[in-house]
Structures are given as C-alpha cells and as structure tokens.
Image (cartoon, rainbow, N blue to C red):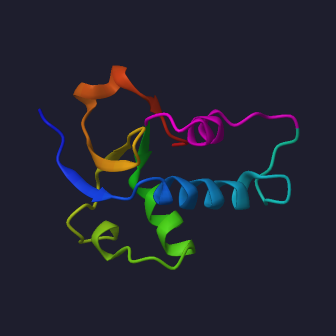
Amino acid sequence: MGRRRTQRADNTLRQVLLKDHREKFGPTGRWHIPGRVSEYEQVLVAGEAIVIDLGTLLCALLHAGLPADDYAFGGQHWGKQFLLDEDGALSEWTEAEADQVVAGPS
C-alpha cells in the first residue's frame, strides 16, 4: 500500500519533535534517567526515518503552539501512526512497512 503524504515540513517538524523530547527527557526534564541514551533522540538528530505515534506528534505540536486539530480526537488523522522520512516529509505509516524504519518512543 502506498503512502499518502499528510504534511510536508522539511526538517521543521523534526526540530519540533526533538525540542519536545528534550524538554521531557533531557537533563532538566521531569522524566530524565541519568546515563540512559535515547535511541529516539539519536535517530531524530541523525535525520533518519522514524515512525511517530499520534500521541507523540500531537503533544509536540500542542507544546509548540502549532495547529493540531487534524490529529486530535475526531480529526482526520486520529488513531494513525506516521513516518517522518529523511527528507522531513510526514506520511501515514502502515505495519506493512515495519521493517523499513526505527520505531518512535511509544
């Protein structure tokens, strides 16, 4: 099944996700675990493709003050997972593509 593009964000979305993750799990974050290396953060920094669950995406958008209605309950993307590819393009992800990328923090 082909991927349907839902948003084109170059690497702006990647930076929003990274900032949100660091605020929660970075050295000053509430959920920081000393000595733990975050594979999720490493993949975002490296610019590799990554699967993002709806909750992670929704929280990052809301914390950044960006429009998130389409991803909230009842929105057109509710309940989906997304692939953020190397180019920064966000598309709907299906389990058939599971062997292609690293999964996000869920």
The residue sitting at 48% across, 53% down in the picture is 11
Residue found farthest to the left: 1
Nearest to the observer: residue 105 or residue 49: 49
Which image quadrant: the N terminus? top left
Residue found farthest to the right: 34
In the picture shown, does residue 36 fall above or below 91? above
Q: Is residue 23 left or right of residue 55?
A: right
Query: Is 39 one of the magenta-colored residues?
Result: yes
How far across and down, in percent of the image, does residue 67 sit? Answer: 39, 77
Q: Which residues, given as a range, are shown in magenta?
A: 35-49
How far across and down, in percent of the image, does residue 4 sit? Answer: 17, 47
User: Which of the 4 image quarters holds residue 34?
Assistant: top right
Labels in figure, total: 0
How far across and down, in percent of the image, does residue 86 sit? Answer: 42, 38
Residue found farthest to the top: 99
Q: Is residue 46 left or right of residue 22?
A: left
In the picture shown, does residue 68 fall above or below 13? below
The residue sitting at 32% across, 66% down in the picture is 71
How far across and down, in percent of the image, does residue 59 sit? Answer: 51, 65
The residue sitting at 72% across, 61% down in the picture is 23
Query: Is 15 one of the magenta-colored residues?
Result: no
User: Which of the 4 image quarters holds residue 83?
Assistant: top left
The residue sitting at 34% across, 47% down in the picture is 82
Q: Is residue 96 left or right of residue 15?
A: left
